[in-house]
Image: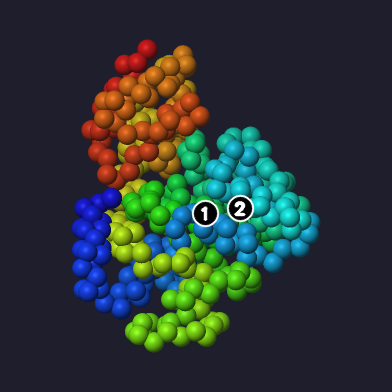
Amino acid sequence: MPRVAIRALNEAVRLKINPSTLDDSMFYSVPRRLKDALGRLLNVSPEEIVIGNSASYGLHLLANGMPWKRGDEVLLVEGDFAADIMPWQGLQSKGVKTRFIRPSNHMPDAEELEGSITENTRVFCTTWVHSYTGHSIDLESVSEVCREKGVKLVLNGSQAIGYKTLDLNRMKVDAVTSGGYKWLCGPYGTGFCWIEPGFLENLDYNQAYWLAMQGEGSLDEMKTGIVEDLGAKKYDVFGTASFHNVMPWTASVEYLLSKGLPSIGHHDQELMRRLIEGIDAERYEIISPVESTESSIFVIKHRRGNTREIYNRIISMGFHVSLRYDRIRISPHLYNTVDEVVSLVELLNKFG
């Protein structure tokens, strides 16, 4: 997290230590400020943002809120992250089927998607950038196919939003969900969902969060009547004023906005370029796309089968990378420097 987020977290701790300094208005102003920041990030009204606690929250909201009929089908991508798959598989008892696209090159293109859609397909759910490979879908062409076929496009943006720009006023996506603790630099237990307003109106999900029903007044008199016209606010996760999470995450998102996503994206692409051009392809199989630097996930596998050993050596030397399916995943972001990436490449290229 950036230093401004740490300061916000310290302020949240201070409020917890001294709760008498906590004003009722903060239960409304704290989540409202987060929605303002996320609305600016995605170029939508803050009132359309659903505060969640993960990417999974929004996916379950959609899966359990859509009006299904038996025989409906959800189209998924084979090998996608589990969070994008399991909420839909849980609909089997309602007669909803799931079917998988097996893409020829990590992620399906528009032609593969179009050839997989049937008259029963209601939803296509996919990740934007693949967590295990760094490959991404062509969002514009995929969204065009979904629009032409009348299929809802549900996008998990967790591995992209924060360095890739997503203008939801321009890009035709029906729903976007994301964790806040990836590229948005928030704490664990943060996330959001955006659902196209017309799509949102058709959800049938029983949720009546007491704080959402209060308006934005004092908490000294509780309202108990159900308010129907809440919009996205109706589906906010319980505990929207979770100060330890929301305050630092808001500070992180505002920090990213102050730097500008295009500038952050340019910086991240330069780090990726150093990785792609610097890694020894004779030593490592590069799983990620090398023709583009638009992803900020770089995945490699040692050609002689020493990947796990190399990973352990790298970790012991102070580099923070991940091991996934016996592959090393490197995920640089704005908190990294070119020198750090160059040092990592030099180290990797020393291993036989």
Residue 279 lies, with reference to residue 180, above or below; the image says: above
Residue 339 image point, x, y percent: 23, 33
Q: Which residue is at a point 61% across and 53% down the rendered structure image?
A: 87
Q: Which residue is at a point 21% across and 58% down the rendered structure image?
A: 10
Residue 340 lies, with reference to residue 215, above or below; the image says: above
Residue 295 image point, x, y percent: 43, 42
Q: Is residue 292 left or right of residue 199?
A: left
Q: Are marks 1 and 2 in contact (CB under 8 Å)?
A: yes
Q: CA distance from mark 1 to mark 2?
A: 8 Å
Q: Is residue 15 left or right of residue 193?
A: left
Residue nearest the viewer, comparing 103 with 223: 223
Q: Which residue is mark 2?
A: 87
Q: Is residue 156 left or right of residue 13?
A: right
Task: Report whether residue 73 is seen.
Answer: no
Q: Which residue is at a point 25% across and 65% down the rendered structure image?
A: 16
Q: Which residue is mark 1?
A: 56
Residue 112 lies, with reference to residue 286, above or below; the image says: below
The three-letter code of the residue at mark 1 reads Ser
Count of marks placed on residues = 2
Residue 125 image point, x, y percent: 60, 52
The three-letter code of the residue at mark 2 reads Pro
Q: Which residue is at a point 43% across and 82% down the rendered structure image?
A: 214
Residue nearest the viewer, comparing 70 with 154: 70
